[in-house]
Image (tube, helix red, strand yellow):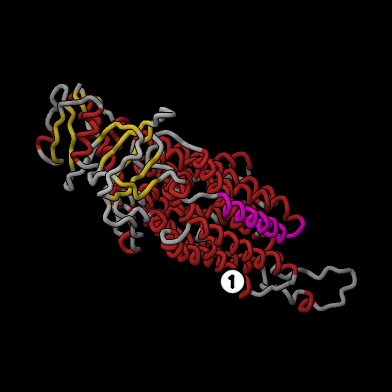
Amino acid sequence: MSTNTNISSETDDNVTTPLIQRPTRHRYTLYHLSTFILTFVSYAMLHAARKVFSNVKSTMAEEWSPVANETIRPIKPDNIWNQTRLFNSPGDATIFLGVLDALFMFSYATGLFISGIIGDRFDLRIVLCSGMIVTAIVIFLFGVLSEWLHIYKAAWYISFWILNGLAQSTGWPCVVAIMGNWFGKEGRGLIFGIWSACASVGNIFGAALAASFRTYGYEYPFLVCTVLLICCAIICFFAIIPSPADVGMEIKHVNTSTEETTTRVNDRETGEETEIIVKTSESTATKPITFFRAWVLPGVAMYSLCYACLKLVNYSFFFWLPFYLHAKFRWQESDADLLSTLYDVGGIIGGIVGGLISDLVGLRSIVVVPALLTAIPMLFVFSGLANDKTANGVVMTVTGVFIGGPANMISAAITADLGRQEILAASDQALSTVTGIVDGTGSFGAAIGQVLIPLIEKRWKDWRFVFYFFVLMTFVTCCCILPLFIREYLLILRNFTIAMSAGCSDLRKRWNDLVGKSEKEAVETIKRDGEQNIEVVDDGTPAADATIKSGVVRVILDENKKVKYPPLRQN
């Protein structure tokens, strides 16, 4: 039901219902901008803390391994000279670093499942900032205090790096949920495509920190990162706003009629029009979705398995690319660090362009699968490159576009779509849980990769076999979402065929939001657009495939009597 009215203080005292007020479409406020920036910066800093560790691995491996006693007049035996060393060789230290990566990812993945549930039940701002503070403390103990006090103990490093994974797991579910609260589905692909660059920007910033401060000792990049994390956490605690309701952009418990209505309200003083949704409600509180129910939501399990394979590849580049460039080509660590950031640059480009295309098409997997298939030959090319910085930089960037870009899309825009499905209308506190499931499953895949990569390289003594493993995982990623890709491809092909053969004009942009809506709501919306001849048919029936009559709008319903495709109109 849709009406136009003026703001009035008169209400019906007999019925109490929640009234949700939101700005009209395409209206963004300073709150939206501040939310975008603060969540972007906070997660970028968390990723920078991870990147610092991956970029000082070579230095740490050398520090933990024996060195020759080359003093002019050695007065100590070598066993005393190297008594604080952890390993017998840099190779053994490298294996331990891979184990640390795996332990971090396993604890991070476990924490994501827990943090997702917590984020839907407690204040997102407090959960996010607490995680950042704990992360800062842990990396100080891991990378700074251990070196200052010469605490070279494997148990020390393992314990604090596991805690680091648990602490950092609070970040992604919280920031995605906050962004999902502020930004609707329209334009989400582009907005989240830009915003999801926060991880890549954090990687670039972390690499720059490592390159700038490592000359003073590997502990100093950790120290700088600790200070910046604490400062960022304090700012976010006082400035971030988890939901529009926290600043009065939603108004609840207003008296009105019991019928669900969509009302356009005109303010007499400003002439400003606001869209208001009024719903009858017997219970004013929405319950968070359960963990197991979130798993069975449409698309969650499929994309979780897909992301497990893709994140394995993406995070392998994240953790091992600088080390690979240094080990294979003997480049200076600072050069390898800076050049490896081109992969992240490619991921930023891929996420933004992919998100924009998916918004225009109205579908996600139709963009993800072709990008991943393009990445497979690029991985073969990357594995055989010679010692040429220009060639490596170009291929690295292109590989980032087609691997990092889809990874950003799945972790941000697609996850937000899954957590804001129409089926969740009765329980809107699900986005953090769904995010934790998708990213947590992906992180388990990434953790397995960190164990396998050093073993593969050590077994065959050739990094090309690592790249062959990446090719296999990328192909498996495509297979995981192939059924969804086929369905979306057939949908596009069908709409195109109908439009071309019957002279229909596909009003996807105009009526795209009607997909998933009820028959009544769709018909009323189309009538408001000036259309009177509306034909409602069920999908799979002969009427759905018949030629549309001139001047008629066809609405096709699914088995649940919801709109399945954007309505088509015969010219």
Can you tell which quarter of the image residue 540 is in? top left
Placement of 504 over or under 479, stated as above or below: above
Instruction: Name the side, left or right, on which 558 lies relative to 133.
Output: left
Q: Tag 1's secondary structure?
A: helix
- Quadrant in which the N terminus appears: top left
Amino acid at pointer 1: Ile
Instruction: Name the side, left or right, on which 392 lies relative to 556.
Output: right
Q: Residues within 10 Å of mark 1 (few under 14, many from 20)?
A: some
Q: Is residue 569 visible?
A: yes
Toward the viewer: 312 or 465? 312
Instruction: Name the side, left or right, on which 234 lies relative to 429.
Output: right
**Which residue corresponds to mark 1?**
158
Q: Main secondary structure of the magenta part?
A: helix
Placement of 80 over or under 209, stated as above or below: below
Toward the viewer: 360 or 337? 360
Residue at point 72%, 55% (across, down): 214
Instruction: Tell whether position 137 is magenta.
Output: no
State the image coordinates of residue 369 (x, y, percent, origin top left).
37, 44
Q: Is residue 407 visible?
A: no
Instruction: Tell whether position 238 is magenta.
Output: yes
State the image coordinates of residue 529 (x, y, percent, origin top left).
25, 27
State the image coordinates of residue 333 (x, y, percent, origin top left).
68, 52
Magenta residues, start to end: 216-239
Give the number of marks: 1
Toward the viewer: 489 or 145? 145
Which residue is the extreme one toward the right? 73
Residue at point 31%, 44% (across, down): 485
State the image coordinates of residue 270 (x, y, percent, origin top left).
44, 29
Placement of 532 over or under 132, stated as above or below: above
Can you tell which quarter of the image residue 113 is in? bottom left
